[in-house]
Image (cartoon, coloured by chain):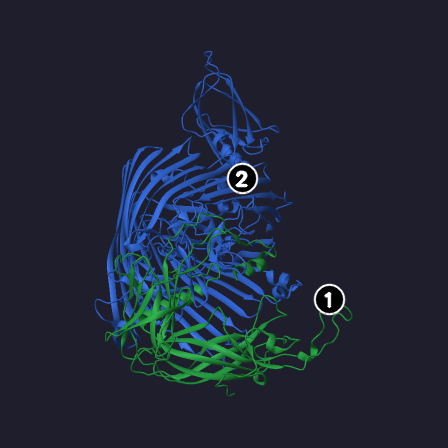
Chain colours: A blue, B green
């Protein structure tokens, strides 16, 4: 806790060394000198304070150039006038320093290393004023260098968990990989890698993300006013753009940690024409397990790996082709009888070209699949339960920029979806008491056309509007049930069945989704923005658990399950302070969600041919306020984000047996009103930095039993209304220390990272449950995923 | 499962499950009804209790509801009263049997005058239980060297294709041959001259036990997956406790045909019994029953009054057919001294 306070204090009070060129500086004591005024100065490193030897100091107006001496000093003789000083040094950010020379004086300037700059300028990319000047709202780009500065999760840099440190983005708990963006469910986010959707990018049941940070260039999360080129999901788009390899020379990264290691390589296949980037990451938990004495552990296994490849070919200056490949695989066997495995795979091929300075064209095709299986080999009722989803799609995007301030974007996309919701295959070699079962496959086609126009009127006003038309077809082959009118859709009320042939249209849905945002800049450093967007979502994650689990089923909209429709209104004020060193923002939003999937009491989702009997459409609404302060530069960087938000659900039904919470609004599984994250990174020296993350959030809703009763000798709990109680509040502090080796030559640039998660060992409950144990009264138990401080150590090497 | 998984991942006990001391809301004590009537001859017991609250150590007693007036009324207007045999347990007369095709309601009047009724339960005919079979199975446990074992009972029946059927299986109290070793009897350790010395008895090695266990297994199914098919369905697991399967064990299975509402209720019960506290657990569900307070329809009454037609079969399980057995427990004494043991087999014992 003290450390946290320390970070907060550091963020608040650290003085910033860099001098920004906002107004003219007056140098010297004015004693009326006119000519040959002696101006001297010293150039030092911003972080270490070391003198920079051999930096170039140029006075543009006087056409004079000086080089700093072995102590970093320079001196100039100038006439009384206004000048602009430019200081350059290899590997450092150039400083432009306007000043007025009025008398003999000194100018001491500090320069910042370029790679520190990359580390530090994080949110809203490399243009420090982008948050103020662009009309975009709720879009957050995080540079990979920034993510790498955060305390690692289990020794690994985690892209998705890093997103959860930002305002308006949260996670259900420590074993939940999905993001909840502004009160939306985990399935309302489209996670795409190189343009292809990835359905379950997690390792180890969601403990961490299956993206190798070494091959990722940057990550952008759109949580409001989602550009018209994206569609199909209600809450957000997480766009992960991989790096392409260098076309000039070979290099790579290697990292070894406690549990896993990774290696990536990149370089030219044909110099200046074709480059390759490959990355692989794997766990070696298995080897450790096999060396243990405990027979349960020895016969268990936990494997995961992910692999990526990017081939980049330059046809000429203006045209390029990129092929990206992504694969992740997990299998986990408990004491060798049940193996759960899942994999994601995607391929995408992209052509990017420009015919003139004003036009660019982007064409891509992709194929992605997500499969999971549960293989039971306990010797009794052996079976294999498999399921999967497949997407193949194309996208076309054309941009015409009349000027920087007037851009058009039009395009279209289409994809085919195939879902295998589940197939149970009994093992014929054992006398299995299980019958084989195959749930009907689902087929759908989702298409969209869109345009967007971004326009700026002078410096003050920006305007962006767009429209997307989404069309969705639900196709055969399929047998669809009919249910009696005015009765609940359950098996007792089936009145008939209709068979549809392969490719035959069963149901169609479509809708228009406008996007609009406006900006008004009060001044250089302050702007106000407002926005609205409407999104349609035709695919739903059917999951009865609070997190994304490998047993979840994806389900397409059909005649019972209407598309989710999300309307979001947002308003924000953005202000940068102290020459963009501090960025601040306050955003408020309101979101209305239609046709959200809720579950009837005791819904049975696995191997269910007619899911409509288990589901019930609900309404959702979410609102909140997000506050954000970020310090971009200096020895101490970091941010504080605080969100107050609510995410509520309601089910209205005429049928007694389907009523949930008396038809009132109730909190969703991830309704966590207060959510605070404090992140600080402090550079002790050029080679050592420490960072810390403190997070706090209100405990998530759970359902407590009201009473205990008996049935057939078993004790049972009576639950009346859902989600009306909460687990205890969540808080956790993670710290890490990063030590860079001073490499000899350019080949070795190693880094040690020592991290401790959950420093003060808080037992944050993931869930509470109620059990009768022999010899004890019925009581509540909590499951904490990370109950103790967890140290990790990793070594990474760049070459 | 997740807990063990985490052990494996981190090779140290990171995750933990421990008691949670929090504010558990104090619930009302709700009336709970448990029991069913069938087309078999009575008595059919109906049990009335009040719930208790989760939480403190000193609470936690489920209390019987005594001295209520309980009756079953059929759709032809005939009312049969039940009599309280033990505290909170009300039996139908032995002569009472429900009739397929009729509907039944349960009526309760408590001592305080409040009146309750169930919604009508219609009895549909039950598909015939063709036969029973069993197989010996082994169940892995936390301790790999000591797996549990037992017998799985399997029902064989043919589901009628022209209707939707909901099945509910219960087992009647079982009987088995209790094998003792009176010849191994020893003197008590306090014996003045020969403590723990051999003291063989002449009688008796073989008894019969009628087993009444507190926790009763049940199984449910709907014909969604096997409509119109000849089906076998595992319906019960009888754990080997080292005594049951030393010789012959007789199980009696009731195959009941229940209403859609009863099936829904039983499914929710079954589901909740499967909750283990892992992250993959289903969220808790409201287990709604079919009882209503006539004066105050908003009062929550738990439990479901089930009326069902039934078909029953017995099966004898022989020790020599079992592949997996626990090491037998030795009773080094006269078997008649064991609780509930009789020297005579039940009247219809016919292995």
Instruction: Please tell me whether mark 2 or mark 1 is closer to you in this view.
Output: 1
Secondary element at tag 1: loop
Instruction: Name, please, the residue furthest toward the right.
Output: B193
Point out residue B270 in the picture as x, y percentages from the top left corner: 42, 67
Vertical placement of residue A59 versus A750, above or below: above
Q: Is residue A345 visible?
A: no
Q: Are marks 2 and 1 in contact (CB under 8 Å)?
A: no
Q: Are marks 2 and 1 on the same chain?
A: no
Query: In this view of the protein, which residue sits in the foreground, A437 or A459?
Result: A437
**Disc 2/disc 1 C-alpha distance (Å):** 92 Å
Vertical placement of residue A722 versus A578, above or below: below
Subunit under mark 2: A
Q: Is residue B69 visible?
A: yes
Q: Which residue is mark 2?
A: A91
Subunit under mark 1: B
B290 sits to left or right of A205:
left
Secondary element at tag 2: loop
A107 sits to left or right of A452:
right
Instruction: Name, please, the residue furthest toward the left.
Output: A485
Instruction: Name, please, the residue furthest toward the top.
Output: A31
Q: Which residue is mark 1?
A: B190
A279 sits to left or right of A193:
right
């Amino acid at each position: 806790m003290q450390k946290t306070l320390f970070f907060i204090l550091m963020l608040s009070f650290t003085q910033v060394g860099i001098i920004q060129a906002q107004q003219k500086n007056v140098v010297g004591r004015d004693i009326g000198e006119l000519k040959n005024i002696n101006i001297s100065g010293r150039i030092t490193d911003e972080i270490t304070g070391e003198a920079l030897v051999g930096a170039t100091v140029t006075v543009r107006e006087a056409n004079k150039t000086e080089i700093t001496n072995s102590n970093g000093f320079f001196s100039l003789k100038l006439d009384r006038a206004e000048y602009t000083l430019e200081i350059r040094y290899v590997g450092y950010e150039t400083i432009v320093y306007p000043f007025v020379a009025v008398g003999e004086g000194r100018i001491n300037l500090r320069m910042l290393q370029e790679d520190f700059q990359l580390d530090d300028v994080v949110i809203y990319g490399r243009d420090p004023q982008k948050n103020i000047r662009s009309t975009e709202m709720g879009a957050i780009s995080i540079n990979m260098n920034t993510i790498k500065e955060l305390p690692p999760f289990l020794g690994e840099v985690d892209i998705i968990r890093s997103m959860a440190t930002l305002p308006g983005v949260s996670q259900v708990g420590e074993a939940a990989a999905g993001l909840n963006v502004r009160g939306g469910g985990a399935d309302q986010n489209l996670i795409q890698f190189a343009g292809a959707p990835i359905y379950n990018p997690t390792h180890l049941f969601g403990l961490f993300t299956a993206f190798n940070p070494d091959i990722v260039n940057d990550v952008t999360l759109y949580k409001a006013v989602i550009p018209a080129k994206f569609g199909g999901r209600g809450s957000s788009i997480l766009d992960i753009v991989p790096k392409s390899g260098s076309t000039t020379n070979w290099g790579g990264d290697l990292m070894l940690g406690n549990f896993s290691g990774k290696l990536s390589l990149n370089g030219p296949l044909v110099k200046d024409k074709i480059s390759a980037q490959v990355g692989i990451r794997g766990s070696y938990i298995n080897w450790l397990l096999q060396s243990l004495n405990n027979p349960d552990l020895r016969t268990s296994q936990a494997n995961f790996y992910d692999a990526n490849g990017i081939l980049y070919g330059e046809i000429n200056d203006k045209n390029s082709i990129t092929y990206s490949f992504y694969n992740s695989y997990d299998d986990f066997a408990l004491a060798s009888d049940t193996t759960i495995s899942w994999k994601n795979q995607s391929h995408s091929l992209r052509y990017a070209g420009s015919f003139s300075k004003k036009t660019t064209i982007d064409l891509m095709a992709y194929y992605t699949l997500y499969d999971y299986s549960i293989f039971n080999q306990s010797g009794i009722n052996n079976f294999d339960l498999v399921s999967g989803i497949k997407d193949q799609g194309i996208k076309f995007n054309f941009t015409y920029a009349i000027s920087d301030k007037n851009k058009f974007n039009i395009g279209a996309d289409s994809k085919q979806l195939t879902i295998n919701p589940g197939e149970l295959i009994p093992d014929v070699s054992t006398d299995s008491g299980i019958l084989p079962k195959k749930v009907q496959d689902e087929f759908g086609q989702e298409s969209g056309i869109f345009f967007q126009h971004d326009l700026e009127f002078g410096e003050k006003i920006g305007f962006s509007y767009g429209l997307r038309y989404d069309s969705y077809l639900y196709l055969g082959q399929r047998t669809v049930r009919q249910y009696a009118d005015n009765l609940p859709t359950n098996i007792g009320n089936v009145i008939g069945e209709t068979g549809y042939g392969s490719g035959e249209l069963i149901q169609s849905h479509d809708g228009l989704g406008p996007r609009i945002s406006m900006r008004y800049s009060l001044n250089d450093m302050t702007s106000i923005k407002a926005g609205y967007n409407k999104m349609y979502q035709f695919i739903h994650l059917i999951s009865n658990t609070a997190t994304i689990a490998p047993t979840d089923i994806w389900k397409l909209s059909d005649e019972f399950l209407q598309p989710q429709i999300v309307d979001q209104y947002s308003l924000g004020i953005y202000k940068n302070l102290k020459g963009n060193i501090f960025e601040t923002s306050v955003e408020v939003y309101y979101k209305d969600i239609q046709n959200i999937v809720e579950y009837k009491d005791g819904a049975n989702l696995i191997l269910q041919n007619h899911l409509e009997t288990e589901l019930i459409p609900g309404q959702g609404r979410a609102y909140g306020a997000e506050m954000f302060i970020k310090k971009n530069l200096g020895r101490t960087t970091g941010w504080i984000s605080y969100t107050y938000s609510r995410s509520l659900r309601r089910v209205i039904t005429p049928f007694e047996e389907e009523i949930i919470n008396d038809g009132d609004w109730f909190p969703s599984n991830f309704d966590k009103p207060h959510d605070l994250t404090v992140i600080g990174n402090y550079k002790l020296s050029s080679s050592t930095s420490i960072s810390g993350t403190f997070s706090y959030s209100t405990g998530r809703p759970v359902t407590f039993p009201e009473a205990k009763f008996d049935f057939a000798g078993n004790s049972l709990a009576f639950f009346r209304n859902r989600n009306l109680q909460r687990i205890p509040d969540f808080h956790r502090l993670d710290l890490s220390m990063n030590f860079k080796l001073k490499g000899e030559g350019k080949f070795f640039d190693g880094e040690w990272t020592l991290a401790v998660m959950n420093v003060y060992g808080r037992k944050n409950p993931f869930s509470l449950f109620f059990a009768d144990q022999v010899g004890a009264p019925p009581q509540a138990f909590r499951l904490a995923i990370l109950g103790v401080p967890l140290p990790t150590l990793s070594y990474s090497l760049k070459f | 499962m997740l807990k063990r998984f985490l052990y494996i991942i981190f090779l140290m006990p990171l995750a933990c499950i421990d008691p949670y001391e929090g504010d558990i809301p104090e619930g009302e004590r709700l009336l709970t009804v448990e029991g069913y009537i069938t087309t078999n001859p009575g008595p059919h017991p109906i049990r009335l209790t009040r719930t208790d609250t989760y939480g403190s150590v000193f609470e936690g007693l489920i209390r019987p509801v005594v001295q209520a007036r309980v009756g079953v009324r059929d759709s032809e207007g005939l009312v049969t009263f039940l009599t309280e045999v033990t505290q909170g347990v009300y039996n139908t007369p032995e002569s009472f049997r429900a009739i397929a095709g009729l509907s039944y309601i349960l009526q309760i009047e408590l001592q305080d005058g409040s009146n309750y009724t169930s919604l009508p339960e219609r009895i549909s005919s039950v598909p015939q239980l063709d036969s029973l079979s069993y197989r010996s199975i082994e169940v892995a446990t936390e301790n790999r060297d000591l797996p549990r074992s037992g017998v799985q009972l399997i029902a064989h029946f043919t589901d009628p294709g022209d209707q939707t059927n909901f099945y509910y299986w219960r087992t009647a109290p079982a009987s088995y041959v209790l094998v003792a070793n009176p010849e191994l009897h020893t003197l008590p350790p306090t014996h003045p001259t020969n403590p723990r010395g051999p003291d063989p008895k002449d009688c008796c090695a073989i008894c019969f036990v009628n087993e009444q266990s507190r926790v009763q297994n049940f199984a449910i199914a709907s014909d969604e997956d096997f409509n119109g098919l000849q089906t076998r369905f595992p319906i019960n697991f009888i754990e080997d406790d080292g005594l049951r399967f030393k010789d012959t064990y007789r199980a009696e299975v009731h195959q009941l045909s229940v209403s859609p509402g009863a099936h829904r209720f039983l499914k929710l019960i079954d589901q909740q019994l499967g909750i283990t506290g892992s992250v993959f657990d289903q969220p808790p569900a409201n287990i709604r029953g079919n009882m209503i307070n006539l004066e105050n329809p908003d009062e929550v009454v738990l439990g479901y009054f089930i009326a069902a037609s039934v078909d029953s079969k017995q099966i004898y399980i022989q020790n020599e057919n079992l592949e997996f057995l626990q090491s037998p427990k030795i009773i080094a004494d006269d078997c008649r001294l064991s609780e509930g043991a009789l020297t005579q087999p039940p009247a219809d014992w016919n292995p």
